[in-house]
Image: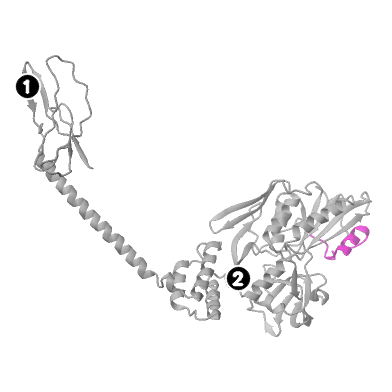
């Protein structure tokens, strides 16, 4: 209830008027807050409630009765106040409030009407195909690292697609999803049909049927190449046995040119039924070779280890634990721990971690393996279009081997999670890096399954090394180069330390200097 207070010098106390209209028979009997009487034997206060003033209650309206020299006088309610002006002000106030309220309600109804017009299809009328499309849209909306969505209105795209894109069959819906993802101009964010999604999942779990190649786009090191570049060739796999090595360029797969081929389309073409064949046109340097490879089931055992001894002067009997990490599947961190424990039981004094031709894999496994070697420190900064949004650090709780000297071997086939691990060990001064600049894949993808068994691979972040280096398309620069003849297998590695006259021999004292 609105109340207006007036205080005048001629009035002994404030008068408060209520704007509540009542019947003539009603009297407002709320009492004005008590006031201590003035101690004067000839001056006393008396109060009585007034009746109605022009149909409005004046509450609490008091007449002050006082007795001076035996004369009683009542101060009328006015006390210099124009009651008609107050009533007029009240009427204007009520009118203005009514106008404001009507305008507010009208505005809200207009906003609701516009919102209903914008929504093309009520949720109850969405088809099953529409709902699958919206599921994919929401996945990208939540997870994609660039919240500008390549400079477009992501919400407007959804409305236009629902209005204009045909989604009457499952294949039409898949085409609509692919078209939506293509607007992001991000080759790593792509749609996976149910069989492709299942194949990708099996690859991260440790088994794959194909020719044993990891492929990528040309980088700054080989950007003049047209086609797809071999990042790594699995030891013992069909491609490796045929002599395909990192840096080779795939020109065609089954007579289809790879010049404009997506790497995931190429990966699908390389995989297939066990025992089936695939034709490859490969360029190695200036030589072009045509190969026919038979697909095999490749078991991805991520770790190989070997005990080596240095026989060079001053370090005779110095034992090295060599660990070759080929991929980051779900078994990788556990296998690395087992290898370290086994080598320690053989009294190794230093470790070599070989990440050459390791094209990456599961991001969490890369983080866990970094924690094995680091006692403390930042592992990686996760960033989006607005900057750093998360930090992964080692706190010592999972440390296994933080004291022994460590050397990490890298090459152009070292990519993705391997680069995260190598960057963390280098920037925290835990290891020296030997080799050549790495591949330069500085973005991270997560895989999401949709309700029909298909999936999305979505770029969820870019990353920076602990020194805040963005390696995308640049790679990590090693501390030292390796001899050009340095072997890629564990047997050849040990031989380089046993023969001081070998062209691949390294100075062990320099190699493991802390």
* Residue furthest top as drawn: 41
Say few, some or many: other residues with alpha carbon within 10 Å of mark 1 (under 14 / 14 to 19 / 20 or more): few
Residue underneath mark 2: 455
Q: Is residue 132 above or below residue 411?
A: below
* Residue furthest front as drawn: 25
Q: Residue 183 appears at what percent x and percent y?
A: 52, 72
In the displayed structure, does residue 316 sit left or right of residue 447? Answer: right
User: Which image quadrant for residue 291?
Assistant: bottom right
Q: Is residue 382 above or below residue 196?
A: above
Q: Residue 96 appears at what percent x and percent y?
A: 19, 51
Q: Is residue 217 visible?
A: no
Q: How far apart, in angstroms, are the residues tagged by discs 1 and 2?
A: 95 Å
* Residue furthest left as drawn: 71
What is the count of numbered marks?
A: 2
Is residue 494 in the magenta section?
Answer: yes
Residue range highlighted in magenta: 481-504
Disc 1 on helix, strand or loop?
A: strand
Res. 242 mark: none
In the displayed structure, does residue 135 sit left or right of residue 329? Answer: left
Residue underneath mark 1: 72
User: Which image quadrant for residue 498?
Assistant: bottom right
């Amino acid at each position: 209830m609105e109340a207006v207070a007036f205080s005048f010098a001629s009035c002994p106390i404030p008068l408060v008027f209520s704007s509540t209209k009542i019947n003539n028979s009603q009297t407002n009997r709320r009492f004005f807050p008590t006031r201590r009487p003035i101690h004067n034997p000839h001056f006393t206060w008396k109060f009585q409630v007034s009746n109605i003033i022009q149909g409005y209650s004046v509450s609490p309206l008091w007449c002050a009765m006082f007795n001076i020299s035996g004369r009683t006088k009542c101060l009328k309610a006015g006390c210099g106040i124009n009651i008609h002006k107050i009533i007029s002000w009240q009427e204007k106030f009520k009118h203005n409030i009514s106008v404001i309220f009507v305008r507010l309600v009208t505005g809200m109804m207009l906003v609701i009407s516009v919102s209903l017009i914008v929504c093309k299809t009520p949720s109850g009328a969405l088809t099953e195909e529409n709902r699958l499309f919206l599921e994919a849209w929401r996945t990208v909306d939540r997870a994609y690292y660039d919240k500008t969505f390549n400079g477009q209105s992501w919400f407007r795209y959804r409305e236009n697609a629902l209005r204009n894109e045909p989604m009457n069959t499952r294949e039409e819906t898949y085409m609509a999803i692919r078209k939506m993802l293509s607007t992001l101009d991000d080759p790593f964010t792509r749609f996976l049909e149910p069989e492709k999604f299942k194949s990708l999942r099996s690859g991260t779990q440790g088994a794959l049927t194909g020719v044993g190649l990891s492929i990528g786009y040309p980088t700054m090191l080989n950007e003049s190449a047209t086609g797809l570049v071999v990042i790594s060739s699995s030891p013992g796999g069909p491609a490796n046995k045929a002599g395909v090595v990192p840096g080779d360029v795939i020109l065609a797969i089954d007579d289809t040119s790879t010049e404009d081929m997506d790497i995931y389309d190429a990966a699908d073409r390389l995989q297939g039924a066990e025992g089936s064949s695939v034709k490859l046109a490969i360029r190695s340097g200036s030589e072009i070779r045509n190969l026919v490879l038979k697909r095999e089931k490749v078991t991805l055992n991520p770790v190989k280890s070997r005990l080596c001894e240095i026989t060079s002067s001053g370090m005779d009997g110095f034992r090295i634990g060599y660990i070759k990490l080929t991929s980051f599947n779900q078994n990788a961190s556990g296998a690395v721990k087992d290898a370290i424990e086994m080598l320690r039981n053989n009294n190794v004094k230093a470790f070599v971690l070989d990440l050459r031709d390791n094209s990456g894999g599961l991001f969490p496994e890369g983080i866990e393996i970094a924690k094995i070697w680091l006692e403390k420190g930042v592992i990686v900064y996760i960033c989006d279009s607005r900057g750093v949004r998360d930090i992964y650090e080692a706190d010592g709780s999972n440390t296994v081997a933080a004291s022994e000297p460590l050397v990490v071997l890298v090459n152009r086939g070292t990519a993705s999670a391997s680069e995260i691990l190598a960057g963390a060990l280098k920037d925290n001064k835990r290891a020296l890096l030997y080799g050549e600049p790495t591949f330069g894949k500085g973005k991270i993808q997560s895989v999401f399954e949709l309700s029909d068994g298909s999936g999305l691979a979505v770029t969820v972040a870019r990353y920076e090394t602990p020194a805040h280096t963005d390696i995308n398309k640049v790679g990590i620069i090693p501390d030292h180069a390796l001899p050009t003849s340095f072997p890629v297998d564990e047997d050849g590695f040990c031989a380089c330390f046993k023969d001081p006259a070998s062209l691949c021999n390294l100075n062990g004292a320099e190699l493991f200097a802390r």
